[in-house]
Image: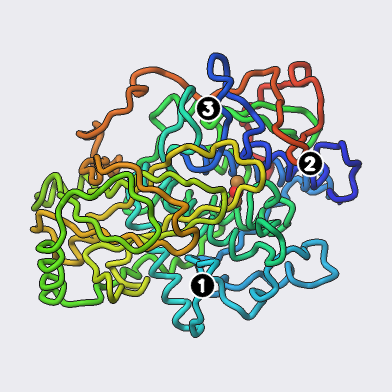
Amino acid sequence: MMKSLPNDDPRNFIQQAKVHCAYCNGGFPQKHPFQDQRIDVHRSWLFFPFHRFYIFFFERILGNLIGDPNFALPYWNWDSIQGMQIPSYFTTPNSSLYHKLRNYKHMPPHLVDLNYDILSPKIRTQDQQVSYNLAFMYKQMVLANTKELFMGSPYRLGDSAQPGPGSIEFAPHNTIHDWMGGVDTPNHEDMGTFYTAARDPIFYVHHSNSDRLWELWTKLEGGRRDYRDDPDWLDSEFFFYDENLNLVRVKVRDSLDTKLLGYVYEEVDLPWLNFAPKPSRTKVQREAKKSSILASKSITNKFPLVLDSKVSIVVKRPKKMRSKEEKEQEEEVLVIEVSESQSNNVKFDVHIDDDEEMLSDQNHTEFVGSFVSLPRGNNNCHKSNTTRFMLGISKVLVNLEAEEDDHIVVTLVPKVGKGDVTIVSDEDWLEVALPKNASRLSVSHRTSRQPESQAKIRPLQIPKSSARRTDEECMVPRQPLIQTLLEYRIRQPKPA
Ligand code: C2O
């Protein structure tokens, strides 16, 4: 139905996809005096709330068109064992949910690889793939136990785009985009690049699941703290078209309670919740290897470092042997500052205290995570930015029995886009201090870097009169924004 609406109707399917495009490829400038900065909803704390609103309006438009105010989008639960294939109703050729530009090799019964590597996809048995996926989900959900690690970095008025993504955004979010995307299209269109991703109907159920994981994460381990005490986050705003063709403005603060948005997620088992990976070697083996690395490498390396081959770096820990209480309150975080020179696919893996010659498999403790980015198409307006890749390693060090060590050995393994990535600096590789749970902690214990913007209230805002776009691809219908703009406040749940 959305596909058959007139081209310039904002509810039209392609128009909806363009709304996403505009927000990811720099369609909107920031407010004066920062109008040179283009807004991007990826790689920052805007990722979850923006996409929640985006599919919320999509859901309302669809519900309205089919005359069902209670319509709810399904979610594609790729994090549970039964959900690791593309849902069959997306793969029936005569269904409106079928889409041609996809990787045909990944049709059922092929299982999704949640940490998919587009250059060298792994051949695994179904059982192996399931356990890799679950171990990976554990890392992305459970080990990412601070708001910075899970939700991404703060992004305030005046900041440049893409300060740093959260765990789920890197993967499985980005990796599934890659995994779904076409094989014969230059940027793996449609799902494999953001400017076209939302043209594939599967986008919406993919994001519905990412949204569900945000919801789940806030309740893990007795409640985790997100940014809801930060006015800059709460007052950041976006524009959408609603089901009545009104252009509306929404604020992040209205996205926090899904019940008020009219939906909840059906509860299902979380098979990854207790699927903690184990070390691949004994403590003795690990220590022998590590001392030979420490003897052969100096602590400082040359930065900026172009990542064109495997490299191990010795990083000094700011504090070791923290008390149980300290560990409960603060997470030790590995911070890698990354700059990408190209707008192609990029992926590199990070291992801790591993053996460079014989790297542990991804379902082991030593593998701690992957940096994953998608090609941007011709429209990359954020080329020169650096972004922070953060990994929580407190539990990793406990599992490796490496908590008494003064140093850790970090191995970076480029997988896709070798040489396209530069590790910017050697400062602040490790931060101890990102506060964990709200329930246990009320004051911020951040001892390390404090962004200078912290003190000012600067929510990210878009000027009212601007619907500037960078290119044809992202054009949204040209309506005088100022006249149709409505303040959209979420008040009432939809009738049950
Ligand atoms: Cu805005 Cu899945 O991307």
- Mark 1 / mark 3, whichever is N-terminal: 1
Residue named by callout 3? 236
Q: x, y percentage for residue 142?
A: 35, 57
Q: Is residue 447 above or below residue 43?
A: above
The amino acid type of the residue labelled 1 equals Ser
Residue named by callout 1? 120
Separation (CA) of disc 3 from disc 2: 23 Å
| Neighbour tally class for label 2: few under 14, some 14-19, many 20 plus, Cα within 10 Å | many
Q: Is residue 200 above or below residue 386?
A: below
Q: Give the image's coloring scheme.
A: rainbow
Q: Nearer the viewer, residue 420 or 140?
A: 420
Horizontal relation, residue 478 to residue 265: left or right:
right
| Neighbour tally class for label 3: few under 14, some 14-19, many 20 plus, Cα within 10 Å | many
The amino acid type of the residue labelled 2 equals Gln
Horizontal relation, residue 274 to residue 127: left or right:
left
Kindly identify the residue that appears in the image at 57 percent across and 76 percent down.
111
The amino acid type of the residue labelled 3 equals Ser
Q: Nearer the viewer, mark 2 or mark 1?
A: 1
Q: x, y percentage for residue 8?
A: 87, 36
Q: Secondary structure at mark 2?
A: helix
Separation (CA) of disc 1 from disc 3: 39 Å
Identify the mark at residue 15; answer none if there is no mark. Answer: 2
